[in-house]
Amino acid sequence: MRSILLIPSLACSFVLLAQDPVLTLKLTDAYPLEMPTLHPYALYAQATIDAPETISSVVFHVDGTDLPATAVNGAYEAWWTPSGYGEHAVSATVTASNGNTASALVNVTVSSTITDRTVTTFDGAVIDWTSLGTQWYTGSYTLPQSVGAYDHIVAHLAVSCPAVTGGCDDYDRLAYVQAKAPNGEWVEIIRYITPFGVACDHSIDISDFASLLQGNTEIRMYIDTWGSGGWKLDLDLTYEAGTPAYLYSTVQEVWHGNYNFGDPADLQPVDTVTIAPPMGVEAASLRLVTTGHGWGQNNTGNAAEFYHAIHHVFVNGQSFTQDLWTDCSPNPDGCSPQNGTWQYDRAGWCPGSVSPPFVYDLTPLLGGAPFECAYIFQTNYVDQCHPNNPNCVSGTTCPDCNDGYNPYYPVSCYLIGRSNGPLSMGVAAPTTDDAMPSLRLGPNPCDGRFTLHLDRDPGACVVTVHDVSGETLRTWYFGSKDQLETYPFDVRKLAVGTYFVKVQGRTTQAAAKLVVR
C-alpha cells in the first residue's frame, strides 16, 4: 500500500497529500516494432492508484495525435497504425480522480527488417526450497514486438543441477511456466514434469501465445519441489521470421485449476462455461493440457497418474476425445536414462518432458458462437477409496480410506482466436492480485500441534503434510478458510524433524516449512 504523508502545519493541523497514480507500458524500446507492412498495433498500459481514488482516463500520444485508451479486462488498450517506418515517440498519460497524473514515454523504431531472434529469459535461475524457501521463480523481460513478422515462437527449456544441497531434485515434480498478460492475468504457456535427478533439454511451440509474448513481460515458473534438491532453469524463446497465417491472435481462459477425479461426491467437477470469441475472429482452437496425479493402493486403479483415462470435451454439442495415455519409454523429449520409474507410461505426462497440448479446431463451429464448453471426465471411473465414499472401510475395502492422496487433474485450457484484423485482448481480468498466497504456521517450531493462517480464502481445499521426498504423510479437507484456521492440527505421531505443509485449492496454493521438535 502507498503510505500517506501527514505534514504538520504551524497551527498543528495536518495536510493530507494526494496520491499519484502508477503507470506502466507494455511497449519497449529494447526492440523495434517489426512490421513487413504497416498495420494497427495494440498499445497496452496498466494504471493503478490506491483506494479511495480511481483512474479517470488513460490517453496515448503518438506523433502529435491523442489515442484515448479503452479499459479492457483490467488493462488500457488503444490501437495505433504507424504513419511510416522509423522512430516514433509513444507516450501515455493517466489521470486519477483526484486530478493527479503520471506519464510514461517510449521511443520506438518501426522497422520492416525482420530477422530470427532468440531471447533469453530465465538465465541460470534456481528453484530450491532448502536454500531459497520458495517453489517459484519470477523475472521481468523485454521481448520482440511485431505484427505479421514471425510465424513461430519456440520455447527452449533446459533444466540442470544447481549448486545447492542435493543438486538436482531426486524426484519427478509437477511444474509449469506462466506469462503475465497485459492486464496482469497469469497464463500457463508450458506444462512440465521434472526428471528424476538428471539434466534435460526441451522444446515446444508456443506460437498460440504470440499476443502475450511481446514487449515488457513477466514470466514465472513453479516447481512442486521440497527439500531433496532443486533445479537450475534456462528458458530461451526463438522468434522465427516468417509470414503467419493470421496477423493477430488472442487468448481466452476456458478452464484453469485442479480438479478431483473420481470423487463420489462430485464425479464431474469441471464447470460448463460459455465463452464468446472476440469480434472478427476468423479461426479458433482449444488448447487443452491435462496431467494426472495421485497413485497407490488407496486410489482405485492407481489413478490418476497410472490410470488410462479417456475424457471428452463438448463444444456446442460436438464431441472431442482426449486420450491421456502417454508412452514414456522412450522418453518423448529424449530425456533418458533417468533415475527412478521414468520408463512407466502415465496419464498425460512423462518424467523429464513437456506435456504437449491437445488442440481442437473450432473454426467450423464459429458460425454457432458463442461456445458452450463442457469437459467430461471418464464417466465410469469412481475412486472407491476416496473419503467421500460412504462405503469405504479402512482395512477392508481399501487400506486407508483417509489416505488423502486422491486422484486429481491440473487442467489448463485456452481458446485461441486468430484474425487478419485487430483483435481486442481476450484474457479475463484477474480476480486477485498476482502475489503468492501467504501461509503462516504457529507456533513454529512446535511439538506437533499448530494452526494455519492464509491471507486469502482458497475456498474448498486440501491441506497436506510432506517429508523432504514429497511423500504425503497427513491430509485434511476443508470447505473454507474459516474451517481451516480454526482447526487444531496435530502431527505428534511424526518423528522430530522438518516437514512441509501445503494448502491447495482449485486455483490457489501455498506452502510453508514446519519444524517438529
Image (cartoon, rainbow, N blue to C red):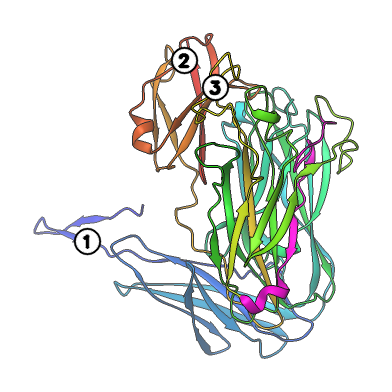
Name the kind of residue labelled 2 in the image: Val
**Residue 180 visible in image:** no
In percent of width and height, residue 217 lies at 62, 60
- Classify 10 Å Cα crowding around label 3: few (below 14), some (14-19), many (20 and above): many
Q: Position of residue 389 (x, y in %)?
A: 52, 29
Which residue was labeled with disc 3? 401
Residue mark closest to the camera, 3 vs 1:
3
Q: Is residue 9 left or right of residue 437?
A: left
In the rendered structure, find residue 195 and report the number of the disc placed on it: none
Q: Residue at x 46, y 31 (%)?
A: 477
Residue at the image position 22 percent from the left and 61 percent from the top: 16
Q: On the image, numbered disc 1 is attached to which residue?
A: 16
Q: Amino acid at mark 1?
A: Leu
Q: Earlier in the sequence, mark 3 or mark 2?
A: 3
Q: Secondary structure at mark 2?
A: loop
In the picture, residue 440 is in which quadrant? top left
Q: Earlier in the sequence, mark 3 or mark 1?
A: 1
Q: Is residue 192 left or right of residue 255?
A: right
At mark 1, the secondary structure is strand
Q: Position of residue 444 (x, y in %)?
A: 42, 20
Name which residue type carries label 3.
Cys
Residue 231 vertical position relative to residue 37 in the rendered view, above or below = above
Q: Residues within 10 Å of mark 1 (few under 14, many from 20)?
A: few
Q: Report the Cα–Cα distance between label 3 and label 2.
A: 18 Å
Q: Is residue 372 left or right of residue 449?
A: right
Residue nearest the observer in this picture, 53 or 284 = 284
| Residue highlighted by disc 2 | 491
Magenta-highlighted residues: 342-368
Q: Is residue 216 above or below residue 385?
A: below
* N-term mark: 2 or 1: 1
